[in-house]
Amino acid sequence: MSYQDKKKIANLYVEPETHAALKRLAVQQETTMQAVAARFLDELQPVLKEIADAYDAIKTGENTQKVLNSFMANSLKIAASNLENDE
């Protein structure tokens, strides 16, 4: 994806502990805190989508336990797929 296709989030405020962790990772990776945060959110995107889908399903009246079970199953599939791709 090109830089022009990305969307900007301005003025994102985080807890001091989160800020410190991002700063440490940025120093370790020789990059910016913004780049670390963006990469982290991009890697989490499939799970973020699953969370949003689960909230939508619960709001529309689906059985909460069924939605949570589906969310967990889908999240584990995502994790397993990422582990296989890393090998």
Image (cartoon, rainbow, N blue to C red):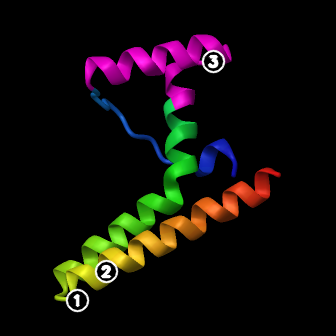
Amino acid beneath label 1: Glu
Q: Residue at x 64, y 42 (%)?
A: 3
Which span is picked out in magenta?
A: 15-36
Disc on the earlier residue, 3 or 1: 3
Question: Residue 33 in the image: x percent, y percent?
Answer: 50, 21
Residue 67: mark in rendering: 2
| Residue identified by numbered label 3 | 31
Task: Give the overall secondary structure of the magenta segment.
Answer: helix
Question: Residue 66 in the image: x percent, y percent?
Answer: 30, 85
- How many marks on residues? 3
Q: Residue at x 58, y 48 (%)?
A: 43
Asked whether, in this view, residue 54 is left or right of residue 79, the answer is left
Amino acid beneath label 3: Thr
Amino acid beneath label 2: Val
Residue 62: mark in rendering: 1
As rendered, which of 33 and 75 lies closer to the eye? Answer: 75
